[in-house]
Amino acid sequence: MRSQCLPVPGIKLPLFFTGIALIAAGLANACNPNPADFFDQGRTSLTLELPENIESYSAEDCRACHPEDYEDWNDSMHARAFVDPIFQSAFRKEPAIWCVNCHAPLSQQAFTQTSGPYVVLEAEALEANDMQLNSASRRIQLRNEGINCAACHVRNGKILSSRPEYGPLEDMTPDGTVAVSKEGPAPHPTVYEPRLSTAEFCAGCHQFNFPFDDPAAIVHYGDEPMQNVYAEWSQHAGLKGISCQACHMSRDHHRLYGPHSPGWLSDRIQMHARMVETALGNVVVQCHLVIHGIGHNFPTGDLFRRVRIQIVINDQVLVERSFGRRILDRRHADAPGGFYKYVSEDTSLTPNEDLKIDHEFQLILPRIPTLQQRQNLSYRVLYEYQNASAAHAIGCNDKNATNCLHAEDMFILIASGPVAMPRIIDPRSHE
């Protein structure tokens, strides 16, 4: 049984977001383990007080003293949360304020021109072209940092740290301006915040329901999970006390390894494929996919992510199967706008109690390959960020290529290899 947030009674789920699902967003009221003092579910941007001795909200100001953390963050999806091509293709289609509140959450990153629950992209473009508007230029540069250091580590004029040696607020030096660790005084007020190391901290951006259009609010959530990562985690890795950070921040802490890290994924995947001729005369490929160390469903997160297994001959796809969620719209007289969204199919793979996905299946070849072709028969495992139906939803077509992505932005190859052939028995061996 799939784990979900509990639905909000009496709320129908309407059509609102027609593009690619967001990398991060607010959390629905019905499933909100995240404290409100961190994130408020995308309803508003974060208004933060700068700590003493910190001159700006930019990650560049952290770089001099924290070069390794900066480089890790700069290579992460947090740093690319706003400029990521997949997000941008959807945002151009539907530039909702709540998208910005999560992908660039600081109030200093916000768009200044809005219309109802949407930002006015054209007005921002005009400001960016006016070199005299230095404040607009700084705001755009800061917005392009996405989810930067301040978004997670600044609250109430203090730097939050997950390192216990900083101690709570009352352990600060008497003047209240400098925190002391085993390494000596910090140049800014720093306090220990244990929640930074919990899955609940991540849930504020990675567990939320579908929103629907409400002119009276920036975002109004329905009752169907749009991203269900925290709920899935709570049924698997969460039962073993393994946090999100234990897997995704185990190396190079702020790099945040995940589906955009091909090597990180490839290290966890084993795939075996063997061709078999059945008694009915069909030729099938028996597939055995094993993925280690998965604390939630796979794939998870964004709506259009799919794992695609292909059987190919010389790069020609013969047959394939994909795993993931399919989201459809259904007309309903009581829903705002007359539509609501629902999950029509969920074939995402679920880990077992050992946090391992162990899945066997068969793919029937459409034709029997020749002996020569069998030597070139191979498999590919792709992690797909956007597929053809998703591209069409955001307006990618022959008449409009603006929202079309390059192939390298749509998927990555995470495993490949030859398809094993049946062992041929020499009849003479039985003489």
Image (cartoon, rainbow, N blue to C red):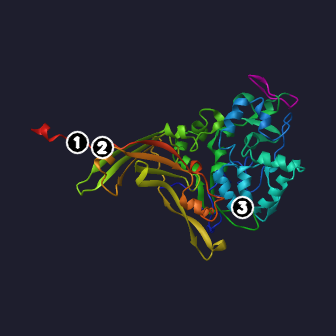
Q: Which mark is residue 104?
A: none
Q: Tell me the amino acid under the disc marked 3.
A: Val
CA gap between label 3 and label 2 equals: 55 Å
Element on which disc 1 rests: loop
Q: Residue furthest top?
A: 183
The residue at 34%/50% (across/down) is: 285
- The answer to whether 53 appears left or right of 231 in the picture is right
x and y percentages locating residue 332 in the rendered image? 59, 74
CA gap between label 2 and label 1 equals: 9 Å
Q: Is residue 27 visible?
A: no
Q: Residue furthest right?
A: 132
Mark 3 or mark 1, earlier in chain: 3
The nearer-to-camera label among 3 and 1 is: 1
x and y percentages locating residue 157 in the rendered image? 83, 40
The residue singled out by tag 3 in the image is: 219
Q: Residue furthest front?
A: 372
Specify whether residue 306 is painted magenta.
no
Specify whether residue 179 is painted magenta.
yes
Query: Counting other residues with Cα less than 10 Å from the Cα at mark 2, is it few (<14), some (14-19), or many (20 or more)?
Result: some
The residue singled out by tag 1 in the image is: 424
Quarter where residue 421 is shown: top left
The span picked out in magenta is 174-186
Q: Tell me the amino acid under the disc marked 1.
A: Ile
The residue singled out by tag 2 in the image is: 421
Q: Is residue 114 above or below residue 23?
A: below
Q: Quadrant of the C terminus?
A: top left
The residue at 56%/44% (across/down) is: 259
Q: Residue furthest bottom?
A: 333
Element on which disc 2 rests: loop
CA gap between label 3 and label 1 equals: 63 Å
